[in-house]
Every structure is written in structure tokens, then in C-alpha cells.
């Protein structure tokens, strides 16, 4: 069967990404890593929260922070997963030039390479949420969750993150090896401005517009509302918006980022060819 | 449709190199290719012969859509590589020698199969072809070996198989035997020649700085140096121009200050190249007339240089290169080490 360029770029990159992500150690150690890493992250957060609030787990702030952090795992995983493929192929495996001359669609190839990290991220999110519900009294009632809202928000949100990853991947094409953590660096920088760890009201007024301009802010709010609606609404940040309005804003910003990613890719791709950067290997 | 597999017209490429920390704003220009006009016919095994830094790899990068030229144009399989790269890519493939690219976590079969899938090959056909090609390069017993466990040479063989796997219309091989041992290089050369001979619609462009390889394999050869194509013809025709000259190789005792210029200043000595060998030196001379040998012997005697061995031989592509450039290829490589390829 002759699959389209887009399909085979995405599916084969997904296969390759999974092989690369899951084969670096034996399956047992890999499973331990996938389980321990999110639990360790959650434990650090809980300890910090406990020290600051004196262990007040009944406050609506706790599920706000906990859920924000749990779903923020996707931000690093998807954005870094997509952009890391450029560095990995170009500098480590030295295959980027061979991918480039193959009849594939490079953006879909990069997106496919990010799928494995999305899947590992999903496991991490589930483990984090499960640990919260089991051991930390996170008010997570699966029978009362709005699963429709959850699924729609998740799909749009992950698409939005993938588009942001594509922008970072395009920029990565233009820069040297020391930008290898660009995805995680950007994810880290946005952490403070997207309402993941505290409501935007905590930020100085002049910094808040950054948060309001970021689609991640609306996405995290939707994820919280879908799982623990009434607790999420305890914070005024986006209280004036209905779920539908939030989805509209998220969708609109996702489209903006999608358009931006297309133009960024085209420009970076063109410049990379002009400057001879596609098979560049950093000398340090 | 044009019968040319590759066409270039006034193709040029200039790299802008940033200076060191103190001269960061100063951009130096490095001419990697200049006014390259080449035509390669379908079915041809065409060689680009030149020292490291001559511009061979730059030309391949442009032809494979990886790099934009700064002037001129190029077509591969009748498609413009800049205007329509997506039409070029399904028809080509490329392998660079001397590198160990590939996904070390994957087996040889997985690496090759994955690339075949990117090219849209049916999986069953790809698997059969992988086995056939691995047999041809003596790698069939490594089918299920992780490529990180292969030696550099075997990994290079795997990459060469990757190039042939998709059976492209035009295949680019950049120094395919670089770093391979004699036996492996012979296997690869056999594969190359066999692939082109098996189907006359296939075209192969090969870069090399091994004269013997170009002479043995190529239907036509372009000699390239400092980004310019200096000559382009069949190896036989290139050498024919030198057949009216006399070519001598002389092994001597140490040269006692004798330089190649001193020899070239002698009447009817067209080119002279000197190289050190154990306990002495080797002189390679292209003489317009055999009689010029007397003046060479005379100057050797004056410098108290003893002749240990003297032989006359047929011209080779190395002599053609020396005649065109004025130096042996290895001497150019020593001088041009920082020049971009």
C-alpha cells in the first residue's frame, strides 16, 4: 500500500521516536523510570506546598497547583519531544540530512517524533493524578468529571503544544547544539506565566498579560474545570469565562500558533538551506 | 523530457564565515563553487575528482536540495533543485562516506527498513531487497545486529546499502569508500558498477579523491579544484592529452635543497612534484620531450642527489590533475586544509 507522504512521515517517525525513547535501557528499568520520574516531581511539589501552607491540603489551592503541575508535564514532553528530534537527528545520529532528502514532510516527521514523549507524558500524568487521589486526598471524582470537556480540551491543548513544539523545532534548525534544551527551557520559562503553579493574580500586574496571551493558561484552566469543576472556579483568574468561551479562546490561539508554526518552519527551512545548516554539527 | 540526469549552469556557492571573537562582525567570504557547468547523462557513472576542500561535497549538497546555491541553477532528473525540491527528492538518494550515521539503537534491518518506509516502498519488497543488498556487500550475517555494535566500516557499508535500497534514478555517493579497508572498498566498488550496469536509466554521481577509484569506475570524470571544474571527459581522453608527454618517476637520495621550481625552470619540464619517502625523495616529472630528462639528471648531479630508481610510465589521472593544477593532489590537500568542502 502506498501511503501518502504525510501519513508515512508521521507514522514512521512515531515508530522511530518510540524506539529511540524506549530502547535506551532494558524494559524493566524503563518502566521504573517512567513511574518514578513523575512521582518524584509530585513529591517535590507536595513537600514545598506542605512547608509553605503548613499542610493545608483542604485548601482549593492544593488541587489547583497539583492539577496544574500534573498537566504541565505535557508542556515539556510535547514541546521538547518535537524540537529535540532536530538536535538528536542532526548532531547525535547524523541522519537529519538523509531525512531531509527523503520524500517526506519534515514538519509531520518532527510531530511524529514527539508522539512517544506524549505517550510517556500521558503515563506520567496518570500516575501523578493517581498518586494525588490515593495518597493526598485530591478531590478527583471520576464519576463527576466532565469527560467531554476533558477530551476536547486535551485534544486541542496537545495540538496547541505540538504547534509550539514545531516553532521551537524550526528555530532549533537554525541554532547550534547548546540549544539542545530549547524545548524544556521554554517550557520552564512559561511555567511561571501560565497559571500552573499559582493563579495569575499572584504575578505583578505588568507581567499578567504574558499569561493571558499564552494558550497554556486557558488549557490548564479547562483541564482543571473538566476534572474538579467547582474547585477550579474558586480562583478569579478566568472565572468570568464560560467553558465554551475558554474553548473558543484556546482554539483561536491554537490556530494562531498553527499558522505561526507554518510560517516559522518555512522561513527557518529556507534560511537553513541558504546558510547550509541542515547537516551542521556543533564543534563543541 | 531532457535526457540529462544532472545539469548545472554557472552554479556558484559562497559561504560567509564569521570571524573569531574579536572580528565577530567581519564576515569573510569563502568561494566553495564557482561557475560550475556540468551535464551528466542518464545511465552515466560520473565522477567528481578533487582534493578535500575542492567543493565536491558542496556540489552534492546543492544537487540533493540540502543547500541553496548563491548563483546559477541546477536540475536533477529534469527538476530544478531550488524551485521544486519535492519533485527531486523521490528520485534521488545520497550517502556520505567517512561517517557513522544511523540509529545505533536499531538493528541493521530496522535502520534500512525504516528508510525504505520513508520512501514508500512496500514492506515485503523492502525486506527482500535489504537481504539481497546486504549479501552483495557481505553484511548479511549482521541483519539483526544493532548498528551501534558495528565497526565504523560495517556501519558505512550499511549506509551504502541504504542509498541503493530505494533504487533511485540518481544516486549521489560522497566519498563512499573513505575509511574502508581494501576488501570492503572493493565490495562497494563492485556494487556501484553493478548497479549502474544493471539498468541504463540509473545515474550515479560519485565524488572521490582516490584517483584509482575514479579511473576504475567512472564513465566520465570532472576534475575539480578550488570550486572550479578544470576538465571533464572520460578518463581515457583526459589521459590522452598527456600521452604525447613523457612521464617519469625517480626515487633519489635526500634532495639537498632541491625544489620543484628549480626542476620546472629547466627547459621542457612541464611539471615536477616532489614528495618525501623513507630515506630519500620521489620525483614525478611530466616532460614535453624525453630529452629533457638529461637536464633533470644534470641538476640532480649538481646538487649531489643520487638516483636510486628511474622509471617511465603511462599517464594516470594523478598526472592529469598535476598537469591541470600544478601540484599533486595530496600537496593541494595539505595546503587547503581549512578550505570548505
Image (tube, coloured by chain):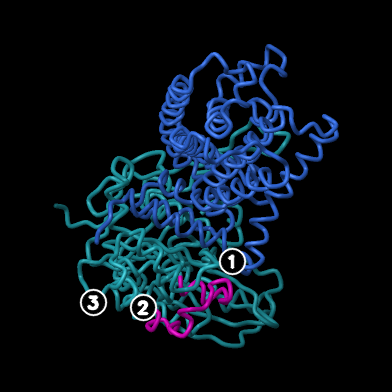
Chain colours: A blue, B cyan
Chain of the residue that carries numbered disc 2 in the rendered image:
B
| Callout 2 crowding tier (Cα within 10 Å): few <14, some 14–19, many ≥20 | some
Q: Is residue B306 visible?
A: yes
Residue name at image x 29 percent, y 75 percent: B195
Q: Is residue B295 visible?
A: no
Numbered disc 1: secondary structure: helix
Q: Does the magenta stretch include residue B152?
A: yes
**Can you name the residue that lies furthest to the front here?**
A143
* Residue named by callout 1: B260
| Quadrant that contains the N terminus of chain A | bottom left
* Residue named by callout 3: B198
**Can you name the residue that lies furthest to the top here?**
A205
Chain of the residue that carries numbered disc 3 in the rendered image:
B
Q: Give me the disc on residue B133.
A: 2
Q: Distance between the residues labelled 3 and 1?
A: 46 Å
Q: Give the range drawn in magenta.
A: B134-158
Secondary structure that dominates the magenta span: helix
- Tell whether A122 sits left or right of A105: right
Amino acid at each position: 500500500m502506498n501511503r501518502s507522504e504525510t501519513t508515512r512521515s508521521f507514522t514512521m517517525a512515531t515508530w522511530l521516536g518510540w524506539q529511540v525513547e524506549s530502547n535506551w535501557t532494558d524494559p524493566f528499568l524503563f518502566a521504573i523510570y517512567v513511574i518514578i520520574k513523575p512521582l518524584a516531581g509530585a513529591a517535590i511539589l507536595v513537600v514545598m506546598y506542605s512547608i509553605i501552607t503548613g499542610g493545608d491540603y483542604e485548601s482549593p489551592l492544593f488541587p489547583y497547583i497539583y492539577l496544574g503541575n500534573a498537566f504541565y508535564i505535557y508542556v515539556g514532553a510535547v514541546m521538547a519531544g518535537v524540537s529535540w528530534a532536530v538536535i538528536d537527528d542532526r548532531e547525535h545520529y547524523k541522519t537529519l540530512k538523509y531525512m531531509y532528502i527523503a520524500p517526506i514532510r519534515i514538519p509531520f516527521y518532527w510531530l511524529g517524533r514527539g508522539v512517544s514523549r506524549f505517550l510517556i507524558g500521558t503515563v506520567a500524568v496518570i500516575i501523578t493524578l493517581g498518586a494525588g487521589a490515593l495518597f493526598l486526598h485530591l478531590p478527583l471524582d471520576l464519576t463527576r468529571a466532565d469527560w467531554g470537556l476533558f477530551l476536547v480540551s486535551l485534544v486541542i491543548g496537545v495540538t496547541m503544544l505540538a504547534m509550539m513544539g514545531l516553532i521551537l523545532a524550526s528555530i532549533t534548525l537554525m541554532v547550534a547544539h547548546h540549544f539542545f534544551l530549547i524545548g524544556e527551557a521554554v517550557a520552564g520559562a512559561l511555567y511561571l506565566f501560565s497559571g500552573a503553579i499559582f493563579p495569575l493574580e499572584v504575578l505583578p500586574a505588568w507581567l499578567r498579560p504574558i499569561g493571558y496571551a499564552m494558550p497554556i493558561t486557558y488549557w490548564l484552566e479547562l483541564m482543571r474545570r473538566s476534572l474538579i469543576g467547582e474547585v477550579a472556579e474558586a480562583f478569579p483568574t478566568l472565572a468570568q469565562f464560560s467553558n465554551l468561551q475558554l474553548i473558543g479562546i484556546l482554539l483561536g490561539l491554537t490556530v494562531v500558533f498553527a499558522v505561526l508554526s507554518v510560517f516559522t518552519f518555512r522561513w527557518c527551512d529556507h534560511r537553513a538551506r541558504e546558510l547550509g545548516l541542515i547537516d551542521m554539527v556543533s564543534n563543541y | 523530457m531532457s535526457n540529462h540526469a544532472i545539469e548545472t549552469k554557472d552554479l556558484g556557492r559562497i559561504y560567509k564565515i564569521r570571524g573569531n571573537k574579536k572580528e565577530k562582525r567581519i564576515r569573510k567570504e569563502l568561494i566553495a563553487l564557482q561557475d560550475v557547468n556540468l551535464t551528466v547523462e542518464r545511465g552515466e557513472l560520473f565522477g567528481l575528482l578533487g582534493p578535500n576542500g575542492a567543493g565536491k561535497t558542496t556540489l552534492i549538497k546543492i544537487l540533493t536540495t540540502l543547500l541553496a546555491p548563491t548563483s546559477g541553477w541546477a536540475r536533477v532528473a529534469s527538476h530544478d533543485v531550488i524551485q521544486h525540491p519535492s519533485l527531486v527528492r523521490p528520485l534521488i538518494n545520497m550517502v556520505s562516506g567517512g561517517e557513522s550515521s544511523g540509529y545505533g539503537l536499531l538493528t541493521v534491518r530496522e535502520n534500512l527498513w525504516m528508510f525504505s518506509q520513508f520512501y514508500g516502498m512496500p514492506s515485503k519488497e523492502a525486506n527482500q531487497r535489504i537481504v539481497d543488498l546486504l549479501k552483495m556487500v557481505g553484511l548479511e550475517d549482521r541483519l539483526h545486529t544493532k548498528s551501534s555494535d558495528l565497526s565504523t566500516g560495517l556501519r558505512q557499508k550499511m549506509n551504502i546499502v541504504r542509498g541503493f535500497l530505494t533504487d533511485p534514478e540518481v544516486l549521489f555517493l560522497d566519498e563512499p569508500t573513505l575509511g574502508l579497508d581494501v576488501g570492503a572498498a572493493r565490495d562497494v566498488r563492485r556494487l556501484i558498477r553493478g548497479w549502474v550496469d544493471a539498468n541504463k536509466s540509473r545515474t550515479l554521481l560519485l565524488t572521490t579523491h582516490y584517483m584509482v577509484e575514479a579511473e576504475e569506475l567512472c564513465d566520465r570524470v570532472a576534475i575539480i579544484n578550488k570550486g572550479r571544474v578544470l576538465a571533464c571527459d572520460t578518463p581515457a581522453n583526459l589521459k590522452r592529452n598527456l600521452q604525447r608527454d613523457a612521464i617519469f618517476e625517480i626515487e633519489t637520495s635526500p634532495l639537498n635543497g632541491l625544489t620543484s621550481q628549480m626542476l620546472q625552470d629547466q627547459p621542457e619540464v612541464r611539471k615536477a612534484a616532489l614528495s618525501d619517502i623513507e630515506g630519500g625523495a620521489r620525483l614525478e616529472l611530466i616532460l614535453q620531450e624525453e630529452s629533457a630528462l638529461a637536464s633533470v639528471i644534470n641538476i640532480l648531479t649538481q646538487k649531489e642527489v643520487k638516483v636510486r630508481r628511474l622509471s617511465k610510465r603511462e599517464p594516470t589521472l594523478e598526472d592529469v590533475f598535476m598537469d591541470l593544477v600544478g601540484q599533486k593532489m595530496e600537496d593541494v590537500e595539505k595546503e587547503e586544509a581549512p578550505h570548505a568542502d
